[in-house]
Amino acid sequence: MDLSVEGKAYINGSFEQCCIGVENGKISSIKKVLKGDVHLNFGYKLILPAGIDLHVHFRDPGMINKEDFATGSMAAAFGGITCFFDMPNTIPQTTDINSLSDKIMTASKKSFVDFGVYAGITDNNINNIETIAKKCNGFKIYLGSTTNTLMFNKQNLKETLIKISSTNKPVLFHAEDDACLNKYKTIEKNLVDHLNSRPAICEETAIKNILETSKGVNAKVHICHLSSCEGLELLKNRSKNITCGVTPHHCLISAGRNLNPQTHFKVNPPLRTIFDKETLFNVLRNGFIDVLESDHAPHTLDEKDAEFNDAPSGIPGVETIYPMFLYLVKQEKLSFQCLVSLLCEKPAEILNAHKGKIKVGNDADFIVVDLKKECKISSEKLHSKCGWSPFNGWPALFPDAVFVRGEKVIENNEIQVSQGFGKFIGE
Ligand code: NCD
Ligand code: ZN
């Protein structure tokens, strides 16, 4: 056995003082006592499954002034995320085999943690879905326009869903209806204007369309970044093949004049009312939401410091998602079971990754957490290239150590592997 790790580990829904054995990057046994070639004893510290962020925009290729696979994956690693899934709205957009292969190659050279990629579906590649499926972990469809989006005509939705269902890969939706967005669009001076120009009815319209169109089609559908009570209501009786995700920003922050600078909180879908925010947090902690996703969408400070109407939408979050929620667990705002399901188990299930659970046969991806070491998030200490965070000053619990496939990737606040350690999962 290459390695054994001892501590208070989260196994099957509860903590046990035990040892996790690792061979060839995989968990080979879990026992009270084990001795590998190397034995690491973390004593009273917690060993939790590492996080999986199924929704990031690492901007590589084409916008590497905002982020690239090295900085994005380093941010992920420091935040306890050992696998991320990258969205297709890069330049070029990943909508065919070539652009997907190129992205996978670039990420394989640069990434510190494991990764997957999405193919964007547009009106032009619907007929190639089966071929494209060979090079991606899932698909993304934008029903409304946002940053550098891939336009998709909703008339094609049924046909697309049928094609996707035969690939067995999930399709993720940005659920804001474009016709609706156009109807409400106004010049925006602040976050309340942004909310009024992308009202909940647009999310509701898009989700209704997805639910109706996917009836009878057995596609694996994921609704990204649910943000409104109206959307939530529609999903209450969803079938098993439909999952939904919430971001930390939508369940922890509401639109208001107190947020400064206002542009730093401009995001799509928009931050909504206090009632939306509180309802989302409540259903999240009660197990109604499937996934917690960051929608890490970095833009430079220069871009974000533009006039409100011209500033791009999107906020970073891959490094802070797990630490912020670990702190909320410590505060007893939600349970370990709930958090691990949201950020580890469910994303692994949706993307078919052998991660997300400390169990024999899975990749040995875990984090070591000392519940006593809480700190305040500081933008300067984060690793995203964008250099700012809307969560600056928020309390958090960062992991002491992070393991990917049994290899220590983070310890003593330093990265322990080189660029390219991360692997594409899916081939
Ligand atoms: C995303 C981005 O910047 O890539 N922005 C955002 O506000 N969420 C685009 C998107 O997926 O909407
Ligand atoms: Zn996104």
Image (cartoon, rainbow, N blue to C red):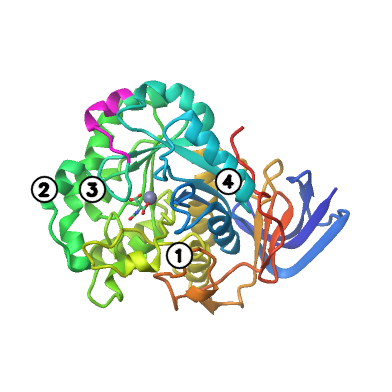
- The kind of residue on which mark 2 rests is Lys
Q: In terms of secondary structure, where does tag 2 sit?
A: helix
From the viewer's side, name the closer residue of 289 and 378: 378
Looking at the image, residue 400 sits to the left or right of residue 34; the answer is left
Residue 418: x, y in percent? 70, 56
Residue 41: x, y in percent? 79, 65
Magenta region: 150-159
Q: Earlier in the sequence, mark 3 or mark 1?
A: 3
For the stretch drawn in magenta, the main secondary structure is: helix
Q: Residue 45 in magenta?
A: no
Q: Residues within 10 Å of mark 2 (few under 14, many from 20)?
A: few
Residue 277: x, y in percent? 30, 63
Residue 313 higher or lower than 121, as above or below: below
Q: Residue 156 in magenta?
A: yes
Q: Residue at x 48, y 74 (%)?
A: 379
Which residue in the structure is indicated by mark 4?
A: 107
Q: In terms of secondary structure, where does tag 1 sit?
A: loop
- The kind of residue on which mark 1 rests is Cys
Using the numbered discs, state the Cα–Cα distance from disc 3 to disc 1 in whole angstroms: 28 Å
Which residue in the structure is indicated by mark 3?
A: 203
Per the rendering, the mark at residue 183 is 2
Q: Earlier in the sequence, mark 2 or mark 1?
A: 2
Q: Are marks 3 and 2 in contact (CB under 8 Å)?
A: no
Which residue in the structure is indicated by mark 1?
A: 386
- The kind of residue on which mark 4 rests is Ala
From the viewer's side, name the closer residue of 365 and 387: 387
